[in-house]
Amino acid sequence: MKLKKRIALLLVAVLLCAGVFSGCKDKKNGDDVAAAVIVKSEHFEITGDMFQYYLATNFFNYCQQYSAYISYIIDLNMPLKNQNCTMSDQEGYTWFDYFADQTLETTTMFLSLAEGARADGMTLSEEDKQMLADELQEMADYGKEQGFEDLNAFLQKNYGKLVTEETVKACYEIHMLANEYFYKLYNGYTFTEDEYSRYAEDNKGEIYKADFISLKIEADYDEDADDEEKEAAYLTALAKAKEMDGAITDEDAFYALIEQYDREQYTVVSDDTEIPSEDQADTITEKTLKERVKQRLTTGAAYSAEGAANSWLFDGARTAGEHTVIESEDLGYCTVYFMVKPVYRQEYATVNVRHILLYADTYGSDEAAYEKADQLLKEAKAAEDLTETFAALAGEYSEDTSSKSAGGLYQNVDKGAMTDEFDAWCFEEDRKPGDTGIVKTTYGIHVMYLESEGLPSWQATADGGLRNDHYTEDYNALKDKTEITSDQEKMKEIPDLIEASEEASEETSGN
């Protein structure tokens, strides 16, 4: 569960891609395409302008995901309809086709969930409508900051000629309704202890762990060694491993043997010695040696039944302190293993934590946001009911839309799930339910309240897996009974997201 910054999906895309694209305007009047129904269910429809908005969003998200090397995948100066997609072997299949297919899947999901919401009697609340109005106003304000006359000009520059304020509003209304139904389904499941245990046994790789120390001893032979020489070298390595295994008495003894082995493999010098570049491959400092020795400890290794090593490590009969040698002659090495903590499940408690996220940009500075956070914390602590008041304040002030509607609550938060500072606060050694505080992260200033302990870590993992399984089954059933139609021909008429450069247009016209 990652903490997500509250920024409209549209703005994420624009901030990522602003300056990369010269514009996304289509040269022909697209009114007929904008009004055409591209995807339709019984009570909802996605028109051409809406489809372009969703298509652009999928494209921008792809650019974000592969931002480090997107220019090697897609030519950002050439229309997508003119580029063959490397994700498919189908002849003539372009990048536009790829993102259009992705968008068809996305809109099919939204319409299916929206139909489910309607059948369940769900409608957008006044709070939802106000949130939508706020998002649109935020987009308009951002557009003005960038020099655009109005929101429509801003949208059309970044999303194409078809997209207007009404487009985004229509998309958000369907998306928000679908989202509400998704959360109702996903959060509505309950599970028993037996179900958690069965999930653990059926998905051991997700649940069961082991801690061990290991040392790989490689056969030492020249590159041009023949099979006989390689076998001799391997037998020497194996003899060394067995000798070491026979000398192990406890964990400290194994660490000492590892250190001795490393000293035989490297020239070890004092920490203040400057090692010439030509000697760095086989020379290390005392500090590096100590670090290497401790790095042989593996904690939380995931269960696996594959291979001789895993068969030994995850044998339920293993006990702490056992050790052995596992051979891998075909790979040219053998490994000494020492069991530190035999197969186990993570039993420590996760946490149920509420927070109120405040952006420095909203308040003008980190200091001002911190002052507001301190004010909100004092107000919550002074109230008769801390939980109720904190939840109400989160609903009013928090800028994390992922938890705002739930009073800032994240449930069953595990170690490493949040940002480092957030995580450190939640799992500080003396942390206990009822604690409050203020934390600064890269996202902003957080007012913190640890409401209670959550499920044991392994059960939280099982809970997430079971929810995903149940939701997938229910969604597939919903999708199967929802009649969705699409106009593939009109879909092809959606304007491209990248306008051809003037040079490319001249070359085309010249040909």
Image (cartoon, rainbow, N blue to C red):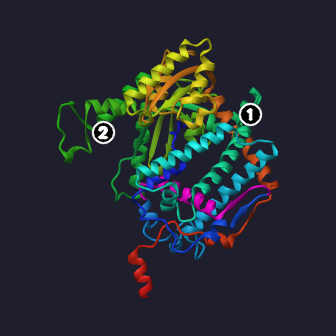
Residue range highlighted in magenta: 42-69
Which of discs 1 and 2 lies nearer the camera? The answer is: 1
Q: Quadrant of the N terminus?
A: top right
Q: Mark 2 or mark 1, which is nearer the start of the sequence?
A: 1
Q: Is residue 22 magenta?
A: no
Residue for point 52% across, 35% down: 399
Image quadrant where one finds the C terminus: bottom left
Q: Is residue 495 left or right of residue 288?
A: right
Q: Is residue 207 left or right of residue 137?
A: right
Apparent side of residue 116 relative to residue 93 in the rendered image (left or right): right
Label 1 to label 2, Cα distance in Å? 47 Å
Numbered label attached to residue 405: none
Relative to 414, residue 330 above or below: below
Residue 223: name its quadrant: bottom left
Q: Of the residues shown, which amino acid type is indicated by label 1?
A: Arg
Give the percent coordinates (x, y) of residue 259. Answer: 34, 30
Q: Where residue 184 sits in the image (x, y, percent)?
A: 73, 38
Toward the viewer: 424 or 124?
Answer: 124
| Residue that protrudes farthest toward the front in the picture | 149
Q: Can you see residue 248?
A: no
203 to the left or right of 148: right
**Helix or strand or loop: what does disc 2 sit on?**
helix
- Choose between 284 and 11: the one closer to the eye: 11
Q: Position of residue 452 (x, y in %)?
A: 61, 19
Q: Please state the horizontal and vertical placement of residue 36, each as a whole percent of the image.
A: 68, 67
- Which quadrant of the view contains residue 453? top right
Magenta stretch containing residue 64, yes or no?
A: yes
Tell me the amino acid under the disc marked 2: Gln
Residue that label 2 marks: 265
The front one of 508 and 198 is 508
- Whether residue 235 is visible here, answered yes or no, is yes
Q: Which residue is labeled 1 in the image?
A: 198
